[in-house]
Amino acid sequence: MKVWLPPYRVELELHGQDLGDFTRGPGDEILISERFAQAFEVEGLTGLLGFHPVEVVRVRRKRKGPKPSAVPRYFVVSPCFGRGAVDEARSRLRRDKLVTCPECRSTGVDTIHGFTLEPGTWQGEDVFYPRGLQGDLVVSERFANFVKRHGLTNMKLIPAEEYICDPDHKGPPATP
């Protein structure tokens, strides 16, 4: 995937009443509101890189309703690729092939029915992509408390052991 280069310009889609504090961007980038960015930096959380201002060129409503009264300022950030590695033995993953690279652990994942990280691999990042599930953003408990405390919107945080992703309805992997 190509890297998103400046100038950073976006069109946003509004599905509810107000624009959120968080949204996925192109590639691995995410967009965060200015209030999210300021609070993240003040509290000293880690794992987001960049903090480049974004120009919102248009907001399109996906449902009927009034246009938003104000469009917050947004920043593009990149979550880091952490050292935390998925514990294959204790996680409930269905993969389409065996993991052959112990570093990236990248193979196709058909289903996820809860996962955990290998003890000793996570280095304390508050937001990161783990090895073995590079497409899934993982956050720390400290980050979850931060979101709740600041009332940040447009995020659904699910405990890793309860996280389910099963787009083809294959069900959980067989237990040995």
Image: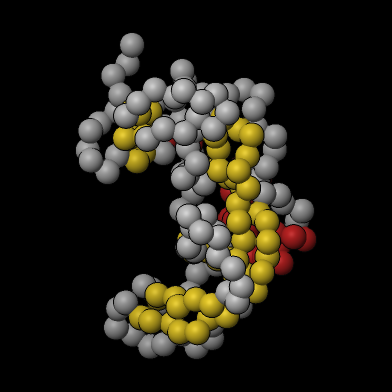
Q: Is residue 153 visible?
A: no
User: Viewed as shown, does residue 19 lie left or right of 146?
Assistant: left
Picture residue at 74% right of the left edge, 60% below the top: 41
Residue 170, relative to residue 13: is it above or below? above
Task: Pick the residue in front: 155 or 145.
Answer: 155
Task: Tell how many labels.
Answer: 0
Q: Position of residue 46 (x, y in %)?
A: 71, 49
User: Viewed as shown, does residue 169 lie left or right of 134?
Assistant: left
| Image quadrant where one finds the C terminus | top left
User: Viewed as shown, does residue 166 lie left or right of 69?
Assistant: left
Residue 173, relative to residue 84: is it above or below? above
Q: Position of residue 97 (x, y in %)?
A: 35, 26
Picture residue at 27% right of the left edge, 43% below the top: 167
Picture residue at 64% right of the left edge, 65% below the top: 36
Residue 158, relative to residue 119: is it above or below? below
Q: Position of residue 137 (x, y in %)?
A: 52, 46
Q: Position of residue 157 (x, y in %)?
A: 49, 49
